[in-house]
């Protein structure tokens, strides 16, 4: 019984069953350490066929009788450490009842090592509402922890535009009157088409009057700016207008005065009745009969100070006295041609501060891990909790997730019309990609003692520079270029951002950027595009549609997740109020190349900044080309942004980058395949840990020394180890050592 130094426990709905020796077949296990080719964490895999007899066999047969091939039985194997006698987790996985065989009274089942790895792999792409109350097995979990974030607001330059397009000829008719000497007014909106609308809540398409229509009463249909939703402050309205009076038709007209005027109205009741307030006359012609065949123009900018409930219209306006008593009605119609018109509405738009729920990136990952395992302590990340300052530069720095629905403080209704909190939906894969866009990260399974944890760290964590052991003399060494790590094209940024239903302009900098390296022998692309949004314009557009004001409106952002760089000034509080980081928190100078930089944010998360953080990874194939550059090719948004931190040069989004300025790589693009006899002591060393900078790190993430074919020491990182009758290694050559 190995002096009871081995303990195997079977877990199922029948309760636990403990064995104190390995089932037959375990010693024929194939042991496999393999680094993920996507996330570069290492996963341990054990696969074999096990034989069960006696009570263990009966236990498993009872389980099979209840559930058949769908029976679930988890098997955990622990061993006592040879020197400390502490129990350590050796393997964890499941018995596969689809492989069940019985022969000569022995039950054979295939054991597939999995544990946390198997759970994580199977659930990786599944999106979960993080406010759910149970884990994937239906067991209760803790209440969702949320914080709050204060959004002070991003100033947005809103540009709307109207044009005459194909309309070049039209007329203005006074209507037919017998006014007995009193003046009567006739008017029509300046003929135009709204071609760009940056503020659909207020900007409007004026009614186009047909030739048959004689006049119109003032109504909301004639306004280009309709019933302001709030005080908007000062805006500029550039107008370019030209026309020729090309003929007059009249009957019994005693007085006529024609003008082009911009008029202000105020809504005064619930029926949307508009009451005239004042006007700005742009062109004052006088009597049009005196100016036939003359051309008139206005090219200027009108300034408006817009208050709540105000409306504005631009009119061709005629005022006259018509008719001759018993002689009947009179009228005047003025004909225009050579008409050109364009009008813009330029608003430096700002919306007051709001507060929204959020979750830190660490809390979001930990919540997903709890949903997978039912355990609140199955996730570890020094990167996201701030102990590693690679990304979160100090204790006052954090990253948060918030969906558009939370930004809007949105509610949703259940089947009984009860209002519920809007959910944050997230998968582990999407959360990983969101952070990986910002800097290279990886995840894997860490084993310490008898516990497994999901490790999520800066990718350099999985390529430690500390030498943790010696593999010995390796044989049958084969080398080849790891061309998959050599890249021609580089793409950084985010899958969404910069393209909006509203014309918010092209000022957003957190979009996508494509660059290229000098390599021509490969067409490999290095892509780090985030699934979460970091665009300040998109978030601001969503924020201005608060649920309290627009309870029945949907926006394209409601289910999108935003990743925001924030200040954590309340690190010790459970429920925190974060503030968005501004340029003054991280940069030496005010950014240039963007509108209203003082109200912008996420300057740390731009594509060029992300490329800078990823450079140690993609540099391995080009590091020898020190006199060459990374060339900027294109961007989907604003590539003129330029930022500067203390102690560095300027970083401009569309600038070429000298390879000499990139961070040095950790490995060379060279695979080393090799073998040696099975060494139990070495295998245990691979699975052990080393204290590095105060943290116990699994040795398979460290740097390993070995003796090469020339009997010289060489250093490499482990990518895979297969161990049965012999040990087969795949190594990646270390750089600079």
Image (cartoon, rainbow, N blue to C red):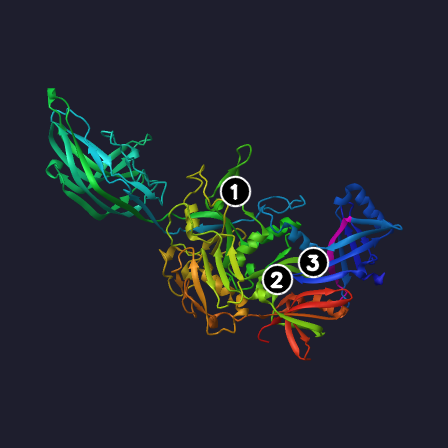
Which residue appears at 24% of the width and 44% of the height?
A: 340
**Among the two numbered marks 2 and 3 on one chain, the one whose residue lies closer to the N terminus:** 2
User: Alpha-carbon distance for marks 3 and 1?
Assistant: 35 Å
Camera sees residue 572: no
Q: Position of residue 405 (x, y in %)?
A: 49, 44
Residue at the spot of label 1: 422
SS under mark 2? loop
Please give left or right for residue 434 compared with residue 11 in the image: left
- Judging by the rendered image, the residue that carries numbered circle 2 is 40
Mark 2: give few (<14), some (14-19) or many (20+) Cα within 10 Å.
some
What is the residue that sits farthest to the top in this orientation? 326
45 or 469: nearer the viewer: 45
Q: Write down the residue under mark 3.
A: 451
Report if residue 272 is visible in the image: yes
> Which stretch did the figure color magenta?
83-98
Element marked by disc 3: strand
Location of residue 257 (image quadrant): top left
Relative to 590, is 114 on the left or the right? right
Q: Is residue 455 above or below residue 166?
A: below
Give the main secondary structure, helix, strand or loop, of the magenta stretch: strand
Residue 341 percent across, percent down from the top left: 25, 44
């Amino acid at each position: 019984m190995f002096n009871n130094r081995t303990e195997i426990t079977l877990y199922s709905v029948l309760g636990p069953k403990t064995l104190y020796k390995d089932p037959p077949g375990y010693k024929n296990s194939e042991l496999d350490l393999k680094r993920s080719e996507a996330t570069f964490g290492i996963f341990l895999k054990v696969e074999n066929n096990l034989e069960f007899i006696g009570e263990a066999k009966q236990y498993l047969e009872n389980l099979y009788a209840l559930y058949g091939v769908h029976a679930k039985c988890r098997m955990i194997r622990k061993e006592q450490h040879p020197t400390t006698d502490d129990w350590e987790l050796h393997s964890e996985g499941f018995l596969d009842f689809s492989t069940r065989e019985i022969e000569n009274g022995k039950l054979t089942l295939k054991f597939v090592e999995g544990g946390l790895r198997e759970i994580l792999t199977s659930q990786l792409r599944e999106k979960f509402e993080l406010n759910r109350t149970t884990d994937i097995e239906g067991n209760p979990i803790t209440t969702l922890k949320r914080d709050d974030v204060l959004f002070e607001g991003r100033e947005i330059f809103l540009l709307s535009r109207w044009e005459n397009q194909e309309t070049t000829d039209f007329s203005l008719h006074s209507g037919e009157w017998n006014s007995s000497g009193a003046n009567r007014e006739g008017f029509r909106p300046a003929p135009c088409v709204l071609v760009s609308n940056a503020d659909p809540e207020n900007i409007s398409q004026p009614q186009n009057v047909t030739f048959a229509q004689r006049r119109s009463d003032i109504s909301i249909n004639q306004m280009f700016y309709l019933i302001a939703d709030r005080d908007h402050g000062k805006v500029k309205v550039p107008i370019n207008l030209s026309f020729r009076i090309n003929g007059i038709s009249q009957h019994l007209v005693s007085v006529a005065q024609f003008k082009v005027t911009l008029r202000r109205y105020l809504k005064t009741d619930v029926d949307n009745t508009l009451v005239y307030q004042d006007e700005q006359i742009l062109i004052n012609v006088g009597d049009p009969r005196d100016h036939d065949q003359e051309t008139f123009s206005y090219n200027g900018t009108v300034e408006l100070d817009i208050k709540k409930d105000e409306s504005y219209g631009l009119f061709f306006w005629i005022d006259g006295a018509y008719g001759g008593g018993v002689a009947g009605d009179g009228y005047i119609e003025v004909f225009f041609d050579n008409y050109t018109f364009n009008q813009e509405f330029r608003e430096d738009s700002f919306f007051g501060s709001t507060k929204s729920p959020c979750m830190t990136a660490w809390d979001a990952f930990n919540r997903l891990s709890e949903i997978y395992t039912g355990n609140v302590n199955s996730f570890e990340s020094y990167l996201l909790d701030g102990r590693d300052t690679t990304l979160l530069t100090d204790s006052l720095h954090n990253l948060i997730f918030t969906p558009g629905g939370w930004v809007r403080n949105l509610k949703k209704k259940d089947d009984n019309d009860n209002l519920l909190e809007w959910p944050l939906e997230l998968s582990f894969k999407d959360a990983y990609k969101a952070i990986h866009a910002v800097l290279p990260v990886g995840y894997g399974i860490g084993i310490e003692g008898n516990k497994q944890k999901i490790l999520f760290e800066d990718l350099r964590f999985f390529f430690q520079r500390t030498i943790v052991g010696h593999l010995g003399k390796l044989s049958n060494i084969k080398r080849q270029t790891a061309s998959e790590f050599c890249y021609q094209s580089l793409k950084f940024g985010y899958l969404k951002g910069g393209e909006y239903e509203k014309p918010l302009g092209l000022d957003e900098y957190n979009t996508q950027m494509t660059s290229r390296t000098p390599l021509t022998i490969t067409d490999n692309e290095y892509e780090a595009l985030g699934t979460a949004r970091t665009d300040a314009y998109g978030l601001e557009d969503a924020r201005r549609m608060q649920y309290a004001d627009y309870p029945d409106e949907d926006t394209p952002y409601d289910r999108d997740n935003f990743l925001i760089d924030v200040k954590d000034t309340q690190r010790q509080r459970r429920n925190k109020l974060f503030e968005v980081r501004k340029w003054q928190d991280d940069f030496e100078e005010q950014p240039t190349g963007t509108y209203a930089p003082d109200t912008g944010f996420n300057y740390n998360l731009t594509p060029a900044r992300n490329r800078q953080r990823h450079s140690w990874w993609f540099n391995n194939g080009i590091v020898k080309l020190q006199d060459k550059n990374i060339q900027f090719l294109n961007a989907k948004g604003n590539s003129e942004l330029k930022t500067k931190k203390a102690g560095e040069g300027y970083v401009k989004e569309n600038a070429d980058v000298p390879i000499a300025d990139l961070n040095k790589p950790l490995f060379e693009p060279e695979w080393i395949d090799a073998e040696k006899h099975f060494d139990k002591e070495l295998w245990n060393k691979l699975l052990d840990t080393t204290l590095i900078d105060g943290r116990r790190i699994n040795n398979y993430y460290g740097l390993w020394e070995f003796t090469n074919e020339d009997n010289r020491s060489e250093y490499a990182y482990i990518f895979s180890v297969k161990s049965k009758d012999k040990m087969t290694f795949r190594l990646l050559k270390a750089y600079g050592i």
